[in-house]
Amino acid sequence: MRFLAALLLAIPLSAAAVPQAGQPAPGFTLPSQDGTQVSLSSFRGHWVVLYFYPKDGTPGCTREAHNFERDLARYQAANAVIVGVSVDDVASHKEFCAKQGLTFKLLADADKKVAEQYGSLRNLLGLKFAYRNTFLIDPHGVIAQVWTDVDPSHHSAQVLAALAARTGAKH
């Protein structure tokens, strides 16, 4: 019985459903690594790559962030911005960006409300963190594509290909 209880506690649960393509992207305002408030609505007119990740400084999260940073000029050429979200605080994001040379916005969802809105909040053995999910949001604020449980090694290339298919930009 104890094994079954432990197994059930280890199953990752999300309180909300993951929004799907065709739905309006849930709005939010969160602080970035520099402490400024960033709203999803401030990116209207641009494609938005909104990616959720578990933890600053971990190997997969660092790899994913480096790949987005490496490809940043290609995103900008496609009129797209990269926005990362985790439940880490502003100080953690500031340190992560400085150490890794990241120049795009990382947003602190310390209250875990945005991750929950996007069906990306994971509860594992009482610890809450974000699933590795990504939402491609069109310039009108509508979700164009969703990736769940992504592989951080190849994900930027996947997103660039999807963006190119929608915009005609090179990937």
Image: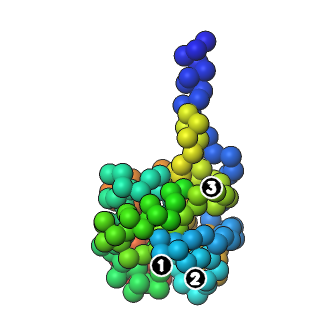
On screen, residue 27 versus residue 81, left or right, reads: right
Residue picked out by circle 2: 43
Residue 75: % across, % down: 40, 79
Q: Is residue 8 above or below residue 93?
A: above
Q: What is the three-letter code of the residue carrying label 1?
A: Val
Measured Cα–Cα span from mark 1 to mark 3: 22 Å
Q: Nearer the viewer, residue 44 or 39?
A: 39
Can residue 131 be seen?
yes
Are the two marked residues, 1 and 2, in contact with CB atoms closer than 8 angstroms? yes
What residue is rendered at 47% in x and 71% in y? 33
Can residue 84 be seen?
no
On screen, residue 40 versus residue 162, left or right, reads: right
What residue is rendered at 59% in x and 36% in y? 126
Residue picked out by circle 1: 81
Q: Is residue 118 above or below residue 73?
A: above
Measured Cα–Cα span from mark 3 to mark 2: 21 Å
Task: Determine which of the numbered discs, if any, sits on residue 110 in the image.
Answer: none
Residue picked out by circle 3: 112
Quadrant of the image occupied by residue 62: bottom left
Residue 151: % across, % down: 39, 53
> Mark 1 or mark 2: which comes first in sequence?
2
> Mark 3 or mark 2: which comes first in sequence?
2
Image quarter of the N terminus:
top right
On screen, residue 66 versus residue 129, left or right, reads: left
Q: Is residue 8 above or below residue 116?
A: above
Q: Residue furthest front?
A: 91
